[in-house]
Amino acid sequence: LFRLAAVYKAALDLFEDDAEATRLWLANPVYGLGNRRPLEMLATSAEAQAVLDLIGRLEHGVVA
């Protein structure tokens, strides 16, 4: 539950508090995550960290 909350908050910040855009991003495959859905990557700390790392890169304009 903590991982979900952390990822949701980071994604919500990325999408400037747009809850619908955040929900869509979390529920759909993301290229930067190997076409996996961010919500599927919360089972382990390492996967959740990969999502948070991607969000951080997106916030700073780093795609790769």
Image (tube, rainbow, N blue to C red):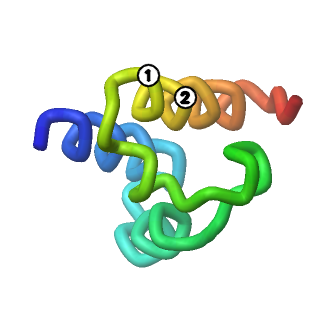
Measuring from the top left, give residue 6's x and y in whole percent. Answer: 27, 35
Work out whether residue 50 or residue 5 is closer to the camera in this orientation and state it.
50
For residue 58, which numbered disc appears in the image? none
Q: Which mark is residue 46?
A: 1
In the visual, does 40 lie left or right of 31?
left
Residue at point 65% right, 66% down?
A: 29
Neighbor class of circle 1 (other Cα within 10 Å; few <14, some 14-19, many 20+) is few
Residue that mark 2 sits on:
50
Task: List the single residue furthest toward the front.
Answer: 43
- The three-letter code of the residue at mark 2 reads Ala
Secondary structure under tag 1 reads: helix
Q: Depth check: 2 or 58 in front?
A: 2
Q: Secondary structure at mark 2?
A: helix
> Measured along the vertical axis of the image, is residue 32 above or below residue 21?
above
Left or right: 55, with 1 as reference point: right
Q: Quadrant of the N terminus?
A: top left
Kindly indicate whether the residue at mark 2 contacts the one at mark 1 (C-beta within 8 angstroms). yes
Q: Is residue 60 or residue 8 the one in the foreground?
A: 8
Mark 1 and mark 2: Cα distance apart in space: 6 Å
Q: Amino acid at mark 1?
A: Ala
Residue at 33% across, 24% down: 45
Camera-near label (1 vs 2) is 1
Residue 34, x across and y down, in percent: 74, 48
